[in-house]
Image (cartoon, coloured by chain):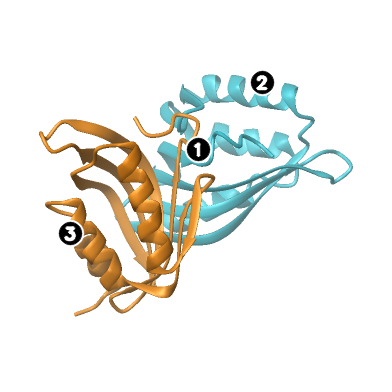
Chain colours: A cyan, B orange
Amino acid sequence: MSDPLSEVLAFFDEWKPTLGDMLTSMEKRFTDETVWENVGMSKTTGFVEARAFMDEFAKMLPIESGEVIVHHASASGNVVLTERTDNFYDKDGKQIVSIKLMGVFEMDGRKIVAWRDYFDTAKGFG
Amino acid sequence: MSDPLSEVLAFFDEWKPTLGDMLTSMEKRFTDETVWENVGMSKTTGFVEARAFMDEFAKMLPIESGEVIVHHASASGNVVLTERTDNFYDKDGKQIVSIKLMGVFEMDGRKIVAWRDYFDTAKGFG
C-alpha cells in the first residue's frame, strides 16, 4: 500500500540504524526534482544535492544514526504534515543533535516530491 | 459544528479586518491555560500573557491587520496541523511582516488548548 501518511512514517523508520541507511532511503525516495528545504537554512533539488548537504552536515558533526519521534502527523490528499523531534547520535550512542520541528511532505506514491522542515533556526542544531 | 479543522480555519478568518478583531478572537478561544508558543521566540500561558505579547509585538511594529494564507492543513483527532503564510499590514495596507511557517493546534471544541508555530527565527519577522 502506498497511502501518503504510511509512506512518510516508513521513510522515518528507514533512517535507522545508520546514516548510511538514511541516505539509501533518501536515494530511493528522492527524484532528480525533489525539493528538500530546511526553511531559512538550506534548499536542495534532487538526491545528488541532498547527499552533498548531508555530507557537509556529517562533516560538521560526527553523526552516526538518526531517529524520529513523531508527535503528531496527518494527511490531506498527497500532503503529509508532521510535528516531530529529530534526534541524531554519534557512534557511541551519545545524542549530539535534537531538533523539535514541523515538516510537510508532498508525496507521489513512495516518492517525495517536496519536503520542507520548519524549526528554530536561531537556536540551530543543539 | 465544531470539527477541529473548521474551528482553526475559522480562527484564522477572525483575525480580520483589524488587530482588535484578532485579539477578540484570541480572548474567545484561549483559556487561562492555553499554551501559545512561537518556538524559540516566545511562550505564553493564558490569554492575559498572550495579549501582553501581542501588545509588545504591536509596539515594535505598526501592525493594523493580519491575514493568513493556508497552504496545507489537516487534522488527526483534535490536533490540526497547518502550513501557512501569515501576513501583517500597517494602517495604509502596506505589508510589514510576512512569515512562512507551520503551526499545530490542539483543540477542545472552539477552544485552543495549545498552539505552536515553527518558523525561521534567525530571519525573524520580515
* Res A56 label: 2
The disc labelled 2 sits on which kind of residue?
A: Glu
Q: Are marks 3 and 2 in contact (CB under 8 Å)?
A: no
Horizontal side of A68 relative to B40 (left or right) equals right
Identify the element where label 2 is drawn. helix
Going by the numbered disc 1, the residue's amino acid type is: Arg
Which of the numbered marks, if any, corresponds to residue A79? Answer: none
Name the residue carrying label 3.
B21
Tell whether B45 sits left or right of B14: right
Where does residue B11 sit, x and y in percent of width and height?
A: 23, 63
Please give the residue where the numbered disc 1 appears in the rendered image: A29
In space, the residues marked 3 and 2 are separated at their CA atoms by: 47 Å
> Which residue appears at 34% of the width and 29% of the height?
B126
Which is closer to the viewer, label 3 or label 2?
A: 3
Q: Do the residues labelled 1 and 2 touch (CB within 8 Å)?
A: no
Name the image quarter holding residue B36: bottom left
Q: Is mark 1 on a helix, strand or loop?
A: helix
Have a look at marks 3 and 2 and say if they share a chain. no
Q: What residue type is labelled 3?
A: Asp
Chain identifier of the residue bearing label 2 in the image: A
